[in-house]
Image (cartoon, grey):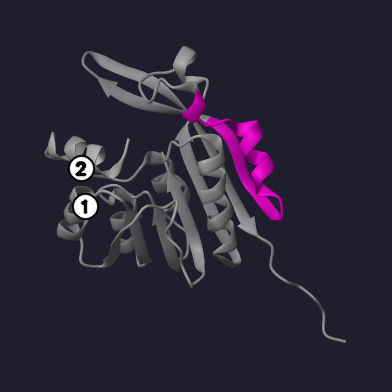
Amino acid sequence: MNSTEWDDRYRSSDRLWSRGPNIFVEDRLATREPGVGLDLAAGEGRNAVWLAERGWTMTAVDFSEVAVSRGRSASSDVEFVVADVLAWQSDRSYDLVLVAYLHLVEGQLRSVVSKAKSWLSPAGEIFLIGHDKSNIDHGHGGPQVPEILWDLDGMLGWMEGLSIIEAQVVRRPVEVEGGLETALDTLIRARARQDRTEPV
């Protein structure tokens, strides 16, 4: 989907995603020391806003003007940027780069992840969460297009040069009419390796 199609999708609902943060973002980052963070393909900014409320200096990037407008209305503490994450560049480093539910063909997603890695500060963390390919047959919701679903083993190969904090397929509860369903997501967290060269 292009930015115009996403604008139309956001206009079709008062709020496309939940108001609160993703449950894994909340669980893993609630006690993390605040720093400078970047949320790529941030949508309405739910994760960025939540992090900013906890002291993070956040930038949120999305190519939907409608989503970004909603994010700006929700928080003046986040720097929202209208831009395509495939083309957007940054000249600063970040203690956290978050990529949540960005679903692109493999080459495009890998390009975004490669840029995200290059923007990490010493010991900065990349946090990746997205619908796993197994979700089609064994989970609920999410895209039904295998080519854009995430693959844990394949994406771990993109983490060269980083230290893995966590890498697994996680189960996410989804509220549906009449009860709960389970979605399957890929979760990868990795940290930049600090230069520990000793002085001579």
Q: Secondary structure at mark 2?
A: helix
Q: Residues within 10 Å of mark 2 (few under 14, many from 20)?
A: some
- Is residue 191 found left or right of 66 in the rendered image? right
SS type, badge 1: helix
Residue at the far right in the pictured view: 200
Where residue 173 appears, as percent x and y from the top left, is: 37, 26
Position of 87 relative to 14 (above/below): below
The quarter of the picture where the C terminus appears is bottom right
Which is nearer the eye, 193 or 103? 103
Q: Is residue 156 magenta?
A: yes
Q: The disc labelled 2 sits on which kind of residue?
A: Asp
Q: Position of residue 198 (x, y in %)?
A: 82, 79
61 versus 99 height, above or below: below
Residue at 69 percent of width and 41 percent of height? 157
Q: Is residue 159 above or below residue 186?
A: below
Q: Residue at x 54, y 64 (%)?
A: 119
Pointer 1: what residue? 65
Q: Is residue 127 magenta?
A: no
Residue at 82% across, 85% down? 199
Magenta segment: 147-169
Q: Earlier in the sequence, mark 2 or mark 1?
A: 2
User: Measured from the top left, where is residue 44 in percent x and y?
Assistant: 25, 48
Left of 154 or right of it: where is 146?
left
Q: Which residue is mark 2?
A: 7
Instruction: Give whichever of 7, 135 is nearer the camera.
Output: 7
- Cα distance, mark 2 to mark 1? 7 Å
Q: Quadrant of residue 20?
A: top left
Quarter occupied by the N terminus:
top left
